[in-house]
């Protein structure tokens, strides 16, 4: 496009994730439709095959750009009664206790309790199970004044002072999945998804964006309109700033 006033030339894709793309937008939209219509998500290998892309690198980069568009800036925080816990991606290493991180990735999980059902969820990779990280996650994910249900881990003790109604559940011989069934079901589904769709080949530096995709899909799992999911993703994609391939590889942005 050419501005008659300032003589500046620009493109309709400037300032979006489609910036400087060498592929037709129609192919991008086909990819977005396919990604949103797949119940269990899509891998780069599958995307390359379906769209006939000549490069795996292109398919990988496109998917990672879309994952960054799956989080809407300023999205509402969880409300009501919310279960919170952590889980390891890749399993628990021997030694160091249940919350020892080691070489694994620790993921904080929050899930709205809607009776026996699960409402919306939030996922975030955290450095460790300290109060700074866990309470910080809750502050980002859960609306103040909500009821936060956790186990008896001491790091959650300061939630009450942070403006939440904290209801810790002590194990006393019970399994964690019995005390906090909603978050443990979400954690189980997350691990199954990573293993099934992505064969467990997710680097830790890229894990946050896979968590964003899982959250996007889970929170819209009851939607009957694939077209609406496509529209929402497209809406967020055009509002996302351009991302370089180097930034994608480094796991930033």
Image (cartoon, rainbow, N blue to C red):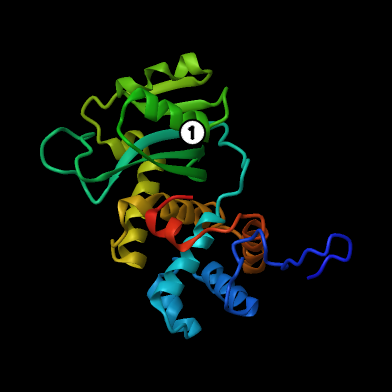
Residue extending farthest left: 95
- Residue at 62% in and 68% down: 226
Left-right relation of 1 to 108: right
- Residue at 39% in and 29% down: 134
Q: Position of residue 196 (x, y in %)?
A: 33, 66
| Observer-nearest of 211 and 146 | 211
Q: Is residue 147 above or below residue 212?
A: above
Circle 1 Cα neighbour tier, 10 Å, few/some/many (<14 / 14–19 / ≥20)? many
Residue extending farthest top: 161
| Observer-nearest of 181 and 72 | 72
Image quadrant where residue 193 sits: bottom left
Q: Position of residue 83 (x, y in %)?
A: 43, 34
- Residue at 44% in and 53% down: 209
Q: Which residue is mark 1?
A: 82
Q: Is residue 147 above or below residue 49?
A: above
Q: Position of residue 32 (x, y in %)?
A: 57, 70
- Residue at 50% in and 60% down: 244
């Amino acid at each position: 496009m050419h501005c008659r006033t300032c003589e500046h030339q620009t493109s309709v894709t400037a300032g979006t994730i489609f910036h400087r793309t060498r592929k037709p937008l129609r192919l991008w939209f086909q990819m977005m439709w396919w990604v949103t219509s797949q119940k269990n998500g899509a891998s780069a290998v599958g995307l390359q095959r379906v769209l006939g892309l000549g490069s795996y690198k292109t398919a990988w980069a496109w998917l990672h750009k879309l994952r960054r568009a799956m989080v809407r800036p300023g999205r509402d925080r969880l409300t009501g009664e919310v279960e919170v816990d952590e889980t390891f991606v890749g399993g628990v290493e021997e030694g160091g206790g249940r919350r020892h991180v080691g070489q694994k990735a620790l993921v904080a999980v929050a899930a709205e309790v809607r009776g026996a059902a699960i409402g919306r969820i939030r996922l975030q990779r955290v450095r460790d199970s300290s109060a700074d990280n866990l309470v910080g996650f809750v502050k980002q994910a859960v609306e103040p004044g909500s009821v936060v249900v956790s186990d008896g881990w001491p790091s959650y003790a300061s939630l009450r002072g942070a403006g939440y109604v904290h209801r810790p559940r002590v194990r006393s011989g019970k399994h964690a999945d019995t005390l906090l069934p909603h978050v443990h079901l979400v954690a189980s589904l997350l691990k199954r998804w990573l293993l099934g769709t992505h064969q467990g080949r997710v680097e830790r530096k890229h894990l946050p964006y896979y968590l964003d995709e899982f959250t996007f899909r889970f929170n819209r799992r009851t939607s009957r309109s694939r077209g609406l999911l496509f529209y929402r993703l497209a809406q967020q994609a055009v509002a996302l700033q351009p991302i370089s391939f180097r930034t994608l590889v480094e796991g930033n942005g």
